[in-house]
Image (tube, rainbow, N blue to C red):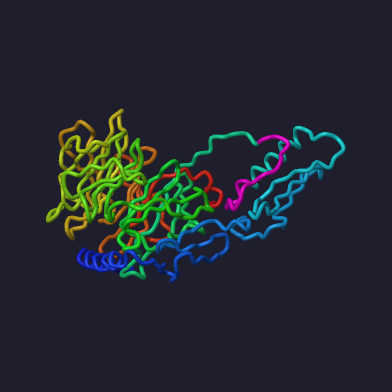
């Protein structure tokens, strides 16, 4: 797949399209892809799409149940299971309660004697297995069991990936979402998680294990934030917030007070989402910069600072600029970044990126408190337009663009070397990634 990115084309295209949106304010907005009028809705499977303020909003269809990605109409049995001794029968049914579909678990003991401990354990395992294999929460679950399933710590760290571009032109936009689970090395596409609109050069963060995307290059996403709920294989994207300013190729940070969007193509301002408060100004343009969270501050590395590619590394907190750290050896934008802990010290990492057409493979790192960045192992290839995340003391870079080709490799840096640890289902660049707990998805991904 061959393509190239043109800053000039993007600037002109977004400028023209965004002006059309502004000129059209005051009139009712219609939806695109597919076309629809305000308030119009349609249903496909378990998902209802409704046109609202020019954007298709996805919600769960409340009149049907969804089990293993299949629609089940009310008043139908989904599955019935009987224990090996024939004494205990469990059923999962789709019912209608006050106009809303619900999935109901029930259990019946047909033996004249009370259930034994072995029967209770078998029933518990059966119900746990049902819960693992049910991948859609279309309605609440009610019912009775002989004994509650034991509580277990089942957090499984993973990386959630959305949007981006897979080629040249609008037709190359990627709207799919996928999950990578380092523990298994597997990547899976989520069936209902397509973004409602083309979205690239956006940010994604996790708030309480809920992914939130904000901004993007297209005129219908540049002030839009969506959240993905529930965080499971059955989740869908719905409206979260509208930003005060247009945001694309910006940075983001989850502070103690909430999600903060920083800079971007249109502004050096910052804003908190969804409240809109807590804003301060960046010291300079930070287009296509990369942000590293450090407790209740954020470190902004590089970016396009007007006519140059920046080497600046600056720390901010909710009150504004705190300090400048030592500058990188190489100016870079559209790069990856992150951190890990070594000997009790936080180590910053930057890798790849672009120096106005010169795509980079180099890696640099800086222990907090050190006076200069040092060179580390290079990426296996030149890469730019990459998202990155820090997780389990590793820095991950996902996909990206290299010499006219979109890539699908998932790379991890352990402080010494970069290793390929996985592959995207769809190669992409200018996409976004965040860390999540995938314990509700691992069964689906397996």
Q: Residue at x 54, y 53 (%)?
A: 234
Q: Position of residue 151 (x, y in %)?
A: 59, 34
Q: Residue at x 17, y 58 (%)?
A: 356
Q: Give left or right: position of 3 versus 282.
A: right
Query: Which quarter of the figure has residue 44?
Result: bottom right
Image quarter hosting the N terminus: bottom left
Q: Is residue 233 above or below residue 404?
A: above
Q: What is the span of residues highlighted in magenta in the rendered image?
A: 131-148
Instruction: Pick whichever, 18 or 152, lies toward us.
Output: 18
Q: Given the current orientation, which residue lies at the most extreme right position?
A: 112
Residue 257 inside the magenta-drawn segment: no
Q: Residue at x 19, y 51 (%)?
A: 332
Instruction: Pick whichever, 20 or 148, lies toward us.
Output: 20
Q: Given the current orientation, which residue lies at the most extreme front position?
A: 26
Q: Give left or right: position of 421 versus 446.
A: left
Q: Position of residue 360 (x, y in %)?
A: 21, 54
Q: Residue at x 49, y 67 (%)?
A: 40
Q: Given the current orientation, which residue lies at the most extreme left position?
A: 307
Q: Give left or right: position of 273 versus 289.
A: right
Q: Position of residue 139 (x, y in %)?
A: 61, 51
Residue 381 visible? The answer is no
């Amino acid at each position: 797949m061959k393509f190239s990115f043109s800053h000039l084309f993007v600037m002109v295209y977004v400028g023209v399209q965004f002006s059309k949106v502004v000129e059209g304010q005051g009139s009712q907005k219609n939806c695109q892809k597919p076309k629809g009028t305000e308030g119009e809705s349609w249903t496909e499977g378990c998902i209802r799409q409704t046109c609202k303020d020019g954007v298709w909003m996805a919600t769960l269809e409340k009149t049907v149940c969804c089990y293993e990605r299949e629609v089940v109409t009310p008043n139908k049995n989904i599955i019935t299971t009987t224990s090996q001794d024939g004494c205990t029968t469990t059923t999962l049914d789709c019912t209608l309660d006050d106009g809303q579909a619900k999935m109901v678990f029930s259990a019946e003991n047909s033996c004249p004697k009370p259930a034994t401990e072995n029967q209770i354990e078998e029933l518990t395992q059966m119900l746990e297995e049902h819960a693992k294999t049910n991948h859609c929460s279309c309605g609440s679950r009610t019912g009775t069991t002989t004994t509650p399933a034991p509580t277990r710590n089942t957090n499984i760290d993973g990386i959630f990936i959305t949007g981006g571009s897979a080629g040249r032109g609008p037709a190359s936009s990627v709207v799919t979402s996928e999950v990578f689970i380092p523990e298994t090395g597997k990547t899976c596409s989520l069936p209902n998680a397509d973004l409602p609109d083309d979205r690239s050069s956006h940010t994604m963060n996790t708030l309480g294990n809920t992914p939130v995307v904000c901004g993007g290059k297209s005129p219908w996403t540049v002030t839009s934030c969506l959240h993905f709920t529930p965080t499971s294989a059955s989740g869908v994207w719905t409206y979260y917030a509208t930003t005060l300013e247009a945001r694309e190729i910006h940075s983001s940070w989850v502070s103690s007070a909430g999600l903060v969007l920083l800079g971007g193509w249109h502004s050096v301002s910052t804003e908190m989402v969804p409240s809109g408060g807590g804003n301060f100004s960046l010291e300079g343009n930070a287009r296509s910069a990369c942000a590293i969270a450090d407790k209740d501050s954020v470190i902004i590395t590089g970016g396009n600072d007007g006519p140059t590619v920046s080497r600046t590394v600056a720390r901010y907190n909710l009150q504004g600029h705190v300090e400048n750290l030592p500058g990188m050896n190489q100016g870079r934008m559209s790069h990856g970044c992150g951190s890990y802990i070594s000997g009790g010290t936080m180590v910053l990492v930057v890798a790849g990126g672009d120096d106005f057409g010169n795509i980079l493979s180099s890696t640099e790192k800086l222990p907090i408190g050190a006076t200069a960045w040092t060179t580390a192992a290079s990426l296996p290839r030149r890469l730019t337009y990459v998202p990155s995340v820090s997780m389990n003391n590793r820095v991950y870079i996902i996909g990206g663009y290299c010499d006219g080709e979109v890539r699908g490799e998932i790379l991890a840096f352990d402080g010494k070397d970069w290793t390929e640890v996985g592959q995207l289902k769809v190669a992409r660049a200018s996409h976004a990634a965040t860390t999540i707990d995938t314990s509700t998805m691992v069964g689906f991904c397996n």
